[in-house]
Image: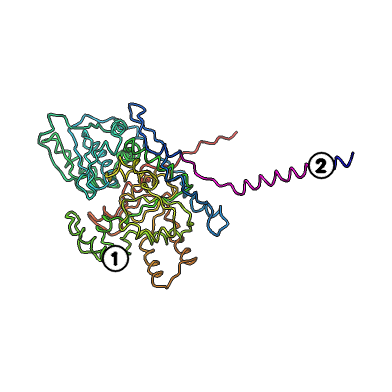
Amino acid sequence: MQKKRWIALTALRKVLTCAICSIALVALFSVHVPVFPSSKQHDIKYQKLSAEQSWTLELAPPHLLKAPLPSRKLDGSSGTVETDKLWKPPPNRDFVPCVEPSPNYTSPTESRGYLLVHTNGGLNQMRAGICDMVAVARIINATLVIPELDKRSFWKDSSNFSDVFDEDHFINALADDVKIITKLPKELATGTRAVKHFRSWSGMDYYQEEIASLWEEYEVIRAAKSDSRLANNNLPLDIQKLRCRACYEALRFAPQIEAMGKLLVDRMRSFGSYIALHLRFEEDMLAFSGCTQDLSPAEADELRIIRENTSYWKEKEIDPIERRSKGFCPLTPKEVGIFLSALGYPSNTPIYIAAGKIYGGDSHMAALRSRYPILMSKETLASVEELEPFTNHASQMAALDYIVSVESDVFIPSYSGNMARAVEGHRRFLGHRKTISPDRKALVRLFDKLEHGTLKDGKNLSNRVIEMHRKRQGSPRKRKGPISGTRGTERFRSEEPFYVNPLPDCLCKKELPMQTTL
């Protein structure tokens, strides 16, 4: 009897051992793969849901079905602690948005006339200008006509306001601030109007006196330009808060752009935490700035000719070496790769390239791709059919990059242009999300030492790069005023732009609940 029991017990142990081994093997060889819908579903579909034109989108292009999911562990490291530090946002010190108007703020008073606005520049330059013109309309008691987007800039984009922004939402969201209409009344459409280049960085007195006085002769005032027409500082708090409400709440992208942007974010999220890299290595930027690092003589000459033939670019003769040494050039793709490696980001880090067409294409991206092979963009995340509604419209394509950049775990701009500044400010408003601003002037000196062999790519370089960027990661701070010693226009030009950092005007310390004692 005991012998039978022993045989049964032995058999049971063997079964349990086999089961445990099987489970262990399954766990060991299991790999998580991002799941996308079948290729039959990859075409984007706009489905109208309501009168407000909400949209839904079906995921995902079939070319992503084979995309690898990177490990989230640092190469050659213990893993989680270092990884968490790389992605962790800076402490927000309990700052939260506070854009509600004061108790004394009233609904718009009776309009004295109509303000027409011709915006200028690319998407983000126009965004800032539109928000400033909302504030100007409030100051001079004007009815704002939906602004006209710039169709004559370098990008030659034919988009109208409603193609890029949610027009109905913009009008309704600001109804308690400014009266906004879609077009001038017919009887005024061909009438005489005052066409004015508003003075740059102007305060309340300029608009309340000089501009408002035009109402005595005209019913329509046309602002020939919109960028940098309002001071950054020393404005009433209610006007500053209005600028923030306009920028971060009212000026929402058109529904189809918002939906496509969310789709791109979801696809990037399938790879885990990601960096949005605003890589300003595009033809217009390089031609305008005169920066030639890592370019061939033929490429440098091509860009020089573009600069000379673009009439509204004032500066023609540029010393590229001097400009780069002062930190006025965008980092090249090669330099960005060195920078990211020195910061400690492993080679399997997913990176979204927020940019237009990179000048020179693959030839200039090779050095960055060799370090970071998981380089994605709207063109690689979405199919041609999905992007077709936005293609050939620079502002709409830039809006997609803007959305993915604002939502990224880390945002890094290679140059502090309009896009970089706008995204940084928006991320500050949303809770001081991690934004690493490269110290280009200091980095250039390190890159040159690498090039000359006096510094090696390794721990020493990494320590120096990490230390110099410890306080350049988007933590809360007050907006910077003018540089000491500057005067006149240069004084205003040297101030940190309002939309780069809306603190203290639009961000306040969160009020903690009162504690009671028994």
| Location of residue 475 with respect to 512 vertically, above or below | below
Residue at image x 41%, y 36%? Answer: 58
Q: Nearer the viewer, residue 147 or 493?
A: 147
Residue occupying the point 49% across, 41% down: 35
Q: Position of residue 407 (x, y in %)?
A: 41, 44
Note whether residue 391 is visible. Answer: yes
Which residue is rendered at x = 29% and y = 65% of the image?
296
What's the mark number on residue 296? 1
The kind of residue on which mark 1 rests is Ser
Against 43, residue 28 (above or below) is below
Q: Position of residue 458 (x, y in %)?
A: 48, 66
**Circle 1: element type:** loop
What's the magenta bit mostly, secondary-structure-wise?
helix
> Which amino acid does the dot numbered 2 rest on?
Leu
Which is more toward the observer, 297 or 218?
Answer: 297
Looking at the image, the residue that sits furthest to the top is: 51
Task: Name the mark on residue 384.
Answer: none
Give the residue at the far right of this rendering. 1
Front-most of residues 357 and 196: 357
Mark 2 closeness class: few <14, some 14–19, many ≥20 residues within 10 Å? few
Residue highlighted by disc 2: 9
Left/right of residue 144 with respect to residue 408 in the rendered view: left
The answer to if 31 sits in the magenta stretch is yes
User: Which quadrant, please, contains the N terminus?
Assistant: top right
Residue drawn at x 82%, y 40% as measured from the top left? 8
Q: Image height check: is 422 above or below 77?
A: above
Asked if the stretch drawn in magenta spans residue 92, the answer is no
Residue 20 placement, left or right of 416: right
Q: Which residues are magenta?
A: 10-36
